[in-house]
Each structure stands twice: as structure tokens, then as C-alpha cells.
Image (tube, rainbow, N blue to C red):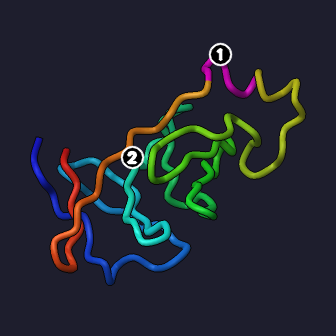
Amino acid sequence: MSKVKIASTADINAGKVLKAKANGQTVLVAKVGDKYCAIANKCPHFGLPMAKGKFENGVITCPFHGSKFEICTGKNVEWVESFVGIPLPDFAKNMMAMGKGPTDVANFAVTQEGVDLFINV
């Protein structure tokens, strides 16, 4: 693993995620409380990017299928709830999941040195 700078503290705006690159991988970085957190910008459902998803209370929602993930842990808290923002009835959620079960997203520990933020990849 190697330590890679992903952002500076000044790059992070409250209530928003920042899309950053780390060794060719795209990650999402945010500040939750007084902690900086990062996850892969890749929903485990179909591998689609989550950077444009709604970010609220430390949770990001995949803009394509409504799956929700804690940005500090990568933990899945809801699985395939909608289709491009349109809520799905319960019977359609299983169809949209296409046989895939709830899965966490890769997360990365963020370290801070001065104003610089780093992850190991």
C-alpha cells in the first residue's frame, strides 16, 4: 500500500462530498462531524459512480438505484430503493437488485497531516 494525498481540508465543504483520484481509483471524501472519511466512488450494485448522489447525515445515496452507504464505514444501510430517484414498490426492489444482496462499499481510513488529507491504496 502507498499513502496518497487526496485533498486539502480547504477542499472539503460542509454537507458535500469531494470526488478525488488516488492511484487511478476515484474516491469520495467528506467531513462528518470532526472526522474526514473516504469511500470508493463505485456503488457495489452495478459499479456506477455515486459522486452526484445525495449526501446527508454522513450517508450518501447512489443516484441510480437509491442504495445508501455510510461514508465513514462504507456500511450499506439501504439496498436498491429507487430507480433514478423514483421510489420502487417492494415487489420491484428485488427485481431491480438483479439477484445481488446488500453489500458494503470499500472505505479508506483518512489521515491528516497539517491541512493535507491522505489515504492508503
Residue 98, how many percent across, how many down?
Answer: 66, 20
Q: Quadrant of residue 77?
A: top right
Is 112 left, or right, of 48 in this rendering?
Answer: left
Residue 118, how many percent across, how many down?
Answer: 21, 61
Label 2: how many Cα within 10 Å (few below 14, some 14–19, many 20+): many
Is 1 left, or right, of 31 in this rendering?
Answer: left
46 relative to 13, above or below: above
Q: Residue flagged by tag 2: what amino acid is it? A: Ala
Q: Is residue 83 or residue 78 the one in the foreground?
A: 78
Name the residue tied to disc 1.
99
Q: Residue furthest bottom?
A: 10
Badge number at residue 46: none
Task: Residue at 65%, 16% (x, y): give it.
Answer: 99
Quadrant, the N terminus: top left
Q: Residue furthest top?
A: 99
Q: Residue flagged by tag 1: what amino acid is it? A: Gly
56 relative to 108, above or below: below
Q: Is residue 100 or residue 107 the one in the foreground?
A: 107
Task: Residue at 48%, 53% (x, y): give it.
Answer: 71
Is 26 left, or right, of 117 in this rendering?
Answer: right
Q: Earlier in the sequence, mark 2 or mark 1?
A: 2
Name the residue tied to disc 2.
40
Secondary structure beneath dot 1 equals loop
Secondary structure beneath dot 2 equals strand
3 relative to 107, above or below: below
Q: Which residues are magenta?
A: 95-101
Quadrant, the C terminus: top left
Is 102 left, or right, of 4 in this rendering?
Answer: right
